[in-house]
Structures are given as C-alpha cells and as structure tokens.
Image (tube, rainbow, N blue to C red):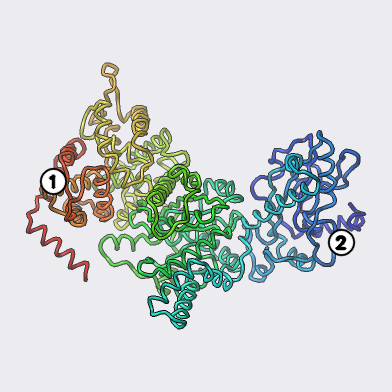
Amino acid sequence: MLKYLGLDRPFLLLVRKLLFSIVRTHVLSDGPQNLGLDPKKPVIYVLQRRFFSNILVLDREVTAAGLMSPLIGFAIPGGREKRAFFFTNRDEPWFGRANKVGYSLRLQRLTQAVRNHPDFDVQLVPVTILWGRTPDKESSIWKLIFSESWSPRGPFRQFFTIFLHGRQTLVRFGQPLSLKELTADAEDEERALRKLARVLRVHFRQQREMAIGPDLSHRRTQVEGILEAESVKAAIETLATENGGGYTAEQKALEKAREYAWEIAADYSYPVVRVFHRFLTWVWTRLYDGVELNNFDTVTGVAPDHEIVYVPCHRSHIDYLLLSYIVFHQGLMIPHIAAGANLNLPIVGGILRRAGAFFLRRSFKGNPLYGAVFNEYLHTMIARGNPIEYFVEGGRSRTGRLLQPRPGMLAMTVQSYLRDSNRPIVFIPVYIGYEKLFEGRSYVGELMGKPKQKESLLNLLLSIRELKKNFGKVHVNFGEPIKLAELLGESHPGWRSEPPLDDARPAWFTQSVSQLGQKIADGLNSAAVANPVNLLSLALLATPRHAMDEDQLVDQLDGYRKLLLAVPYADRAQLTPMDGRAMVEHCEKLRLIQRHPHALGDVMHFYPEDAVLCSYMRNNVLHCVALPGLIACLFSRNTSLSREQLGGLTRTVYPFLRAELFLRWQPEELDVALDAYLAALVNMGWLATNPGREGVYHAPNMNADEYAQLNLLGQVVRPALIRYFISLSVLTQQGSGTVSSDELEALCHLLAQRLSLLREFNAPEFFDRAIFRTFIATLKKAGLAGEDESSKLTFNGAVRAAAAESRYVLPPDVRQSVLHLTRLDQKTVEQALSRLAAKGKS
C-alpha cells in the first residue's frame, strides 16, 4: 500500500492522525458487521470517488467493526491482490485532472479469476461516502457551499471539503454482491465488466439520489422542457384558437403557459435545505419535547428502487416542515411538496420553493392550460426520480379525523405512471400525531362558524410568539408501503396493455384511484400512535363534566392500554409505554389537566379552554377503540346479548362507522375482529360469560367498577350513534321523496347543533357537516336510500328498521330528545333552509 500510494509509513500514520482529528463519521443503516458476509469468501470494497481520504474512512469503519482491513491483500487463484478495495474508475495518478471512466484493473483481474475458476467467488461491498451530508451536526452558511453535490470534485476542493465538513461525513455500506452471480450470464469478459460497471453505477447513483436528490437541471431548463411537451403544446394551441387564432394569440397563450410553469415549479437549493435543517432543529427544540419516530426502515427499504410518494395525514402546517426534516435527518433526499398557492407568500414562498415546495391552485376547473402545465410538471418530477409529498385529504383536518381522500393528485400521479412505468411508484402513508396542536384554537373557531383565517406574512410573524409554549411530543409513524403496480394489477389486470389515457378517463381508472385513496386512508389509520394525550382525552371526554377521580382515571387509562395491547388495531399501530399514573402526570406537565384537591381523593379535569381542543386529540385515535366502544355501548343499554344479536346489531352500524372513521376491517373480516375484542373484554372483566349459556355475554353488575369502565368506553362512540339516529329520524319524519341530500345534510347539521346546546355535547365537531355528508353517501352506497328524478332522497322500510334499532344503543332520554327535535313541519324546514342559504351567500 505504501508503495502504491507513494508514501512511507510514518507519513501515512501522520496523515491518518491529522484526518481523524477533524473527521467524525455517521454510519447509516447497517454497518459492515451486520451485512451477513460469508467468512469463507474474500471481501472487496467498492468506492466511487478516488480520494485518499475515502480509503482512510473506509479502513477505519471496517476495522472498527472487527473485520479485515481493506488495506490488506488476499489470495486469488494464480496470484494475490495487494488490497481489498477498488474504485469504479480505473487506476490513475492520485493528483492531477479528474480520472476518466474505465474499468479498475483489480476488478478486471477478479472478474477473470471468477470466470476461469468455478469454485472461486468474491463478495463486492459498495460503500458510499458523502462529505457534508450527515444529519446529526449543524453547518455554517460557508460550509453549505462545500457540502456534497453532483458536480465533479477534484483533490483541491476535496481538501477544503474535509476541512469544513470533517465532522459531517456520511457512510453507507451496501448489501454484498456476488461477483460470480453478477457475471454468470455474460458471454465474455468484456460484457461481464460492462454489466458490473452498470450495476455499480446504478447503485451509487441511487445512494446519492437518496441523500441529496436527483441531478436536476436548472429551473429555467425545466420550465422550457415543460413547454415543449405535446400535451402542453396542444393546450396552448387550443387556447390560441379560442382567442381568435393567429401568431399573436399563440404567443399570448405560450406566455401564459410559461407564467403558469414559473408559478408552479420548485427551485430546489441544497444549501437552503441545509439552512432549513439548522433552523428547524432550533424550532423543534423550542416547541417540542422530542420527535418519536417509528418504522422509518420502511422508507430506506424501498427508496433505492422506487419513486416514493409520501402521503401524510394533514393536521397542521407543521406537517410540511416536520416530514421533510425527518427524511433529511435520516439521510435521504427531502420530497418535493405540493403546497397550496395560499402559501406562496412574499419572501416565504421563495424560501419554501427553494426547500422543494411546488405550488398548485385549489382548482383547475375551467383552465385546461393550467391543468396541462401542472400535469406535465408533476410527470417531470416523477420521471426524474424526485420523491413527492402531498396530502390526499386536500386540506387540514379541523376535527382530528381523517378527511375523505381527494382524487386530484392521486389521479395525476397514476396517470403519470401509466404514461411511463419504468420506475415503480410506492406510496408511503405517514401518521403524524401531536400532543398539543399549534393551530388548535383557530380550528375550534372555524368549527364554531368563524371564517377561515387567510394565510399572510403578518399572521406568520405573529405565530412566532407561540414558540415560548410547550407542545409536548410529536409522534411520526411510517405505514405499510402501497405499491402502485400491485394495486393496479388487482383492480385492472390488463392495465399495461391499455392505450394512453385522454381526458375521458375510463371507469377502471376512476375506480383504481378511489381504491388507492381508501388504501392510503386505511394505511394512515393503521399507523396511528396512541399517545398519553389521546388516551386521556378518550377517558375524560366520556364523562359529563370532563372530570374524574384520579384513581378512577388511572384505572381507565390502564384499561385502555390493556385493551390495545391485547387487540392492537394494526401491526404498525403504536402505543405509549406509559402506565395510567404516568400518563396523568405527563398531561399535568403539559397543562392540559389540572388537579382539584379533595379530602376523598383528588379530582382531575381539563382546563376550561382545553376540553374542546382535546376532542381533536381523541379523534386522532378514535378508530382504534371504535369497535370495542360499539360493543360497550350495546352492553351499557342491555344486560346480556347473544353472539348472534351482537353480530346483527354490529353489522347494521359498522358500514357507517367504517365510512366515518376509515376502519380497516372489510365486512367479511368483522366477525373475527368482533370475537377478538369480546375475548379481550371478558379477560379484562369488563364483560362476562355464563358457562350454562354458551354464546351469551353479560355486562358486569351496575355497581361494579368494571361496569363504570365499560360504560365510559361505550361513550366514545355514542356521539356518532346519536348523529346517525338524527339523520335517520329526520329522513323518516320528512318522508321518502321529500328532501334532497344537501337539504338533509343542512337539517341534520342544525339539529345536531341545537342538541349540542341543549345537552352539552360541547365539541363543535359533533355537528360537523362533513360527517353527515359521509353518512348520507353511505346510506346511498348501501342501497338503503336513493334519489328520484328530482334529486330527492327515497328510501324503503330498511331505514325505518335501522332507526328503530336505536333503542339498543341510546338511552331513552337522548332518544326522546332526538325524536322531539326532529318533528319538524314543512314551514319550519323551509325557513331553516332559507336562512342557511342566505347565510351562505353573505
């Protein structure tokens, strides 16, 4: 090695000591000790860039793992190799001009040995070393200039990069490759070397893309390329024709398309991303007690071979920043984020654009040219390998529940893939759960009827004062990947042979997009994290005055933990490790609850202003306890029920709960889930069985603590059941063919609002119109209701039967209140709808 490098040993040791006085490495994923190397086969490490510093870093990491140094040679048939590494470019002098691409002489010798000796094989381990990209240290602005990039780097620049980024070096060991297997099907040595070079080139390019993103051309080049696309040219020509045709009209249409492209396109800047990383590290430290991350290996497992589309739930504006921060912090390229045009504010918009945001308008309707430009831009980003991020819900949830997936971005992504399916697309659902919400109070105001506050630079500056508050922890969990090709194969097996799609999308395409949206929603819910605030909100909000004896609250929280441990909602769902007592203490520190001392035991209750806010947190995980909550609700009204009765009543309600909360079980899976929860509730003592009456379940004695706990569990779904009964009662009271879907939705909203005032259901999400809209849509989908030629709702006796079954789940006083409220004469209905219409216009 010394002769090879032209250095003597003392000088080498001195260089090594100087180098590692400033170099700190960060090994991502598995280190060399965890690669599963075969000790019987020689190992040779493959480096991309030919620098002495890279060899020293490699040697340090390998020897630290207890493996043979790459500076030590090994025997091959008919000779011996002096070193156990090579570069992807051929051996040339260390200093001087950049090396030309070629085959390493060592690789040529090894390939020849493997081909000539069937019993000999070599394990190739690609090693990626990036300077200035490690996520766990911060950089000055000057250092950002010399951070890792796609541009070629000579020895002079490498020297300054080491000096500036010595403590910011990322190392990633790839999985070992069998040289024999890679060259087995090659006809001759030249073809074998060509294949090896291609495999290694692709590997290193993927690793670099994962870390710093694709090698993008200048934004101006992207814009001009979009304008050259056939679909955009056609839209320009159409607009020009509509405006009278001719050269002038065509030039105006072209300029309009260029204006749209500049309005949309991101202007990604790696130095800006590094500055953002530094700034956000400070922000998270001020805002949160930490970010809990789960299942990120999901992303690293698919990133090298797939185009990634991150599809997080949308709870806060923080979501944008947090997900990009996490992805970057874990050593991958941040996604390009589809952001609403409302965020393209002065100054802020430019910064976000350079951090990877591209902007889109709320609607493309009536503007086919804008639609064509945006579609082409999205396709360009996907085709170039940029990870993408968007929110399938469209906007932020104001209630804490998932919103219905919107098909727009999903359809454009699927259409892009059908146009070019060379690189497979995978969707990654990302659950983001907060313990306290940055925008919580504005959400409550909007649900109470206040207009949505428009984003502005002033509002952004005013929000800085929130940095002094403590918002607890953030929980981020990555869900099961959804591979688009597999989904299309299930929904439409012949999709690969279909002709290119035009504006008239076929039924199978629409159905596939709908299935994709549903699967993403299921994936988000399946990755839910039940944190202390979620569980405490479930317990306290189930009580009339949102207060509980401390010991009773602790027991209820421990019961919820036991239930969720016995029957996890899904494999990827996460549960706080805290017991009930620790949860109470944690929420006290966050100032979500306060203690009222009392001689018979302290009482815990919400601060008055936080009870409504915590309904949002409860709704984040409501789906996790919805099915056992329905069981508990049935037993709070019935002392005993047979398994057959339970199944029948559950199947009646389940389609509506599933549509509202995106429950994961298909109807045919419901019985298995029901049996699992029944067994768990019996084991907890919250239900009982009688050996003499097989298949019959009993509620505990009404004076027992277990009955009180079961009743509180049932309360978590009772508001939903009341809403359903309101809808059915209004529909049956008005009669078949009397009201339209929109009118029924409006009436239900008003009645729920009034019931909330009368009976203290003081969470404004109780009368959220979107929930009633979903219920009505589910009625029609289930065939329980339809529409006549005048768009009025029609129904049959099944609706009346479903309304009658409310006696099994609702207390008599609540049921009577709903029936009383829904007895509306035609004049009252007309007046109410007229007032709503007038309010909407104003």
Q: Earlier in the sequence, mark 2 or mark 1?
A: 2
Q: Secondary structure at mark 1?
A: helix
Residue at left 35%, top 51%? 401
Corner quadrant of residue 72: top right
Corner quadrant of residue 565: top left
Query: Relative to residue 498, is residue 695 drawn left or right?
Result: left
| Image location (x, y in percent) of residue 381 | 54, 62
| Image location (x, y in percent) of residue 25 | 70, 54
259 up-or-down from 644: above or below: below
665 up-or-down from 612: above or below: above
Residue at left 45%, top 56%? 501
Q: Is residue 75 visible?
A: yes
Label 2 environment density (alpha carbons within 10 Å; few <14, some 14–19, many ≥20):
few
Query: Relative to residue 208, is residue 564 drawn left or right?
Result: left
State the mark number for residue 93: 2
Label 1 environment density (alpha carbons within 10 Å; few <14, some 14–19, many ≥20):
some
| Image location (x, y in percent) of residue 263 | 47, 73
User: Which residue in the rendered view is the most extreme toward the bottom?
Assistant: 248
Cα–Cα span, label 2 and label 1:
88 Å
Query: Relative to residue 79, is residue 541 drawn left or right?
Result: left
